[in-house]
C-alpha cells in the first residue's frame, strides 16, 4: 500500500486506502504497483514502462466506477528516477462512451490546437489506438531539463523577493498612505535634521525610520543574482542567471557557497525566502540569492 507521502493531502490518501482495501477484497485484477486501475490504463502503462523502465508512478486524483461497482483509478502521474518528486505528465486509460478504449496522455509540452490555451484539454492528446498513445507518451512524457525547470519556476523567485520586501513596502507605502518616493526622501531628511514631530502619527513614523530605515532601504533596493539548483538522485545541476548549466556528479564538485545555502534551505519551510540565502521550491529544487 502506498504511503501518505505519495499524495498531496490526507483526504486523497484516505480515499486511496479505502478503495485499495475494497479492490483487494473484491480481487480486482488490474494493478499498477499498489494502485487499482482500469484495464486500459494498465495496458498503456505496461507498454510505456517497457520503453521507459526508469519511470516512477503515483496515483492521480481521477477515480472512476468500473463495471462491478468498484471505484478504481483511471489515471496515474509519471515522474522519473532522477527526480521522483517532479511530475512530468499523466497517463489515463478507460472505456469511452461507445465502450471502446480511450487512451489519454497529459503533458505541459502538449499544445493541442483543437482547443484554446485556457481549455483543460489543451495539454492533452487522446486516441483509441494504443500504439499511437505510446508514441505520444514517449514524445511528451519525459524528464524536464534544468533550463525548462528554471523557466517554469521563475515566478517563484520573483514571488520570494517580493515577500522579502513586503514588510518594508507595507510600512512605507500603505501604513502612512503617501507617495512612496517623496515620503522616503522627506522622512529620511527629517530624521537626519533632528526633526521633532508634533503629531502622534508622524512621531510613530519617525520612530520606525530611526529603527528600521536602513533595513528598509536595503530591502527595497535588494536585487540579488539568482542561481537555480536542482538536486537530482544521482547528480546536482545548477545555473546562475544568464550562464550555462553546470552538472556536478559528486558533492566535491559543488561550490561551497551553493552547498551551504542548500543545506540551510533543506530545513527551511517551502516558499519561505531567506535574504542572501534563497528559497526552497520543492523537495529537490531551489532558488539561491547571491
Image: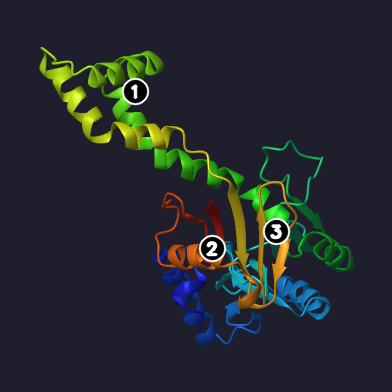
The image quarter containing residue 199 is top left
State which tag comes first along the sequence, 2 or 3: 3
Mark 2–mark 3 contact, CB under 8 Å?
no
Mark 1 or 2, closer to the camera: 2
Specify how the rendered protein is coloured: rainbow
Above/below status of 113 relative to 210: below
Crowd band around label 2 with a 10 angstrom C-alpha radius: few (<14), some (14–19), many (20+): few
Q: CA distance from mark 1 to mark 2?
A: 35 Å
The residue pinned by badge 2 equals 257
Q: Secondary structure at mark 2?
A: helix
Crowd band around label 3 with a 10 angstrom C-alpha radius: few (<14), some (14–19), many (20+): some
Q: Secondary structure at mark 3?
A: helix
The percent position of residue 235, horizontal first and vertical second, equals 67, 74
For image coordinates 59% across by 71% down, the residue present is: 58
Q: Tell me the tag on residue 173.
A: 1
Q: Secondary structure at mark 1?
A: helix
* Residue 204 appears in view: yes
State which tag comes first along the sequence, 1 or 2: 1
For image coordinates 76% across by 80% down, the residue present is: 53
Amino acid at each position: 500500500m502506498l504511503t501518505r507521502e505519495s499524495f498531496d493531502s490526507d483526504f486523497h490518501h484516505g480515499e486511496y486506502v479505502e478503495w485499495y482495501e475494497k479492490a483487494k477484497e473484491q480481487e480486482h485484477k488490474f494493478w499498477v504497483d499498489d494502485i487499482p486501475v482500469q484495464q486500459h490504463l494498465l495496458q498503456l502503462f505496461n507498454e510505456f514502462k517497457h520503453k521507459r523502465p526508469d519511470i516512477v508512478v503515483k496515483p492521480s486524483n481521477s477515480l472512476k466506477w468500473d463495471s462491478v461497482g468498484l471505484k478504481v483509478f483511471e489515471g496515474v502521474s509519471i515522474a522519473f528516477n532522477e527526480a521522483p518528486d517532479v511530475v512530468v505528465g499523466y497517463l489515463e486509460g478507460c472505456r469511452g462512451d461507445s465502450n471502446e478504449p480511450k487512451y489519454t496522455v497529459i503533458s505541459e509540452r502538449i499544445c493541442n490546437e483543437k482547443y484554446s490555451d485556457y481549455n483543460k484539454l489543451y495539454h492533452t492528446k487522446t486516441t483509441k489506438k494504443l500504439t499511437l498513445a505510446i508514441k505520444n507518451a514517449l514524445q511528451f512524457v519525459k524528464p524536464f531539463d534544468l533550463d525548462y525547470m528554471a523557466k517554469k519556476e521563475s515566478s517563484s523567485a520573483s514571488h520570494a523577493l517580493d515577500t522579502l520586501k513586503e514588510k518594508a513596502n507595507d510600512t512605507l507605502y500603505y501604513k502612512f498612505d503617501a507617495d512612496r518616493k517623496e515620503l522616503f526622501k522627506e522622512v529620511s531628511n527629517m530624521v537626519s535634521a533632528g526633526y521633532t514631530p508634533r503629531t502622534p502619527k508622524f512621531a510613530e513614523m519617525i520612530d520606525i525610520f530611526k529603527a528600521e530605515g536602513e533595513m528598509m532601504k536595503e530591502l527595497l533596493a535588494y536585487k540579488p543574482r539568482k542561481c537555480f539548483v536542482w538536486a537530482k538522485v544521482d547528480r546536482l545541476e545548477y545555473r546562475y542567471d544568464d550562464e550555462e548549466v553546470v552538472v556536478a556528479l559528486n558533492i566535491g564538485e559543488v561550490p561551497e557557497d551553493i552547498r551551504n545555502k542548500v543545506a540551510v534551505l533543506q530545513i527551511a519551510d517551502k516558499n519561505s525566502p531567506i535574504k542572501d540565502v534563497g528559497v526552497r521550491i520543492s523537495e529537490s529544487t531551489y532558488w539561491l540569492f547571491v
